[in-house]
Amino acid sequence: MSLDYQEIRAAIVPVQSFDLTIEESQLFKKYKPLGYILFSRNYQSPAQLRRLTDSLKEASGRDGILILIDQEGERVSRLKEPHFKVLPNAIKYNRDAKINLNATQERLRSDFALVGKQLREAGVNVNCAPVADIRYDWADPIIGVRSYGNDINTVVALCEAADKGLAESKVQSIIKHIPGHGRALVDSHLELPVVSTDLKTLLETDFKVFQRSGAMKLAMTAHVVFAAIDDEVPVTLSKKAIDFIKRDIAFNGLTITDALDMQALRGDIGEVTQKASAAGCDILLYCRADLKGVEVVLQNSHKLKYHIIERVKSFNCFC
């Protein structure tokens, strides 16, 4: 990779449409974001998507950029059939795993390997999957069918299979939403969830999944207040919570925020960005197709720190 990591902003930002505008190119050349996230609004055809990802590399002045997309499964997949495989919702794999876990793991690995291959061919090298949140039937359905179930062993096994399949195609996975979004009673896209469950229970359930997935390289934070850790501030903005993730949950990879523009983190986007950085989040994610907002996030993002540089270099997705 030909890049000077120390000049790069630790931010992932969006693109407005199918092609880069002159204004976007100028902004990206000026601030050098670590990478970009794409959505359905950025896709017309495989050839067009490849041109877009190539133009992002050109605007960045380097090949070593992260290009993210959400390609989890049926409910959350930005790229659709017939050109891109859309996996079943995670709940389908959970049902199959109850019959034969080993066979389901192998099929999920193979399925994500194909998804990764197709993403790779389009120039996308990071998939915001798998979802490691435990499913609770009484909780808000924002996780729901996206979860691999409520059995810790099954969720861990299937998340590992998804990670392995993506890695085979040289696509980096992002496990989410650390330390757990399954108990949330509201959708964090719309408002801030507060979980009052005691710490002992959390450590034995939701947190345990991420603790056992500590070898994964990237985890996306949950915009959730866990009263047992910090009863005032959501995980993404809480130094107590980020320290807890790294120390007590023993997650050894990098943390990337969920979208900083979600309604759970209401407030000035510049201040929200600064708070997430101060809390210790390694990488900052912004998703709204608003060029002014993108610029504010980039202005307020920290530059890559040494430990982030070393971890990013270890990603097997830059070939």
Image (cartoon, rainbow, N blue to C red):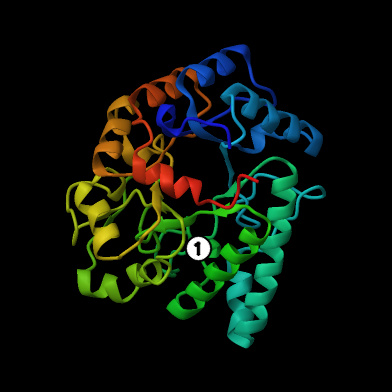
Give me the residue at 37% from left, 61% from top: 180
Taking depth in this image into account, of 15 and 142 the one nearest to the observer is 15
Residue 89: give x, y in percent of width and height: 62, 63
**Label 1 amino acid?**
Gly
- Judged left or right of residue 173, residue 277 is left
Q: Secondary structure at mark 1?
A: helix
User: In terms of image quadrants, where is residue 137?
Assistant: bottom left
Taking depth in this image into account, of 41 and 11 the one nearest to the observer is 11
- Judged left or right of residue 57, residue 249 is left
- Residue 257 seen in this snapshot: no
User: In terms of image quadrants, where is residue 97?
Assistant: bottom right
Taking depth in this image into account, of 314 and 110 the one nearest to the observer is 314
Give me the residue at 77% from left, 31% from top: 48
Residue on which disc 1 sits: 144
Residue 109: give x, y in percent of width and height: 66, 69
Give me the residue at 63% from left, 16% from top: 21
Give me the residue at 65% from left, 42% from top: 124
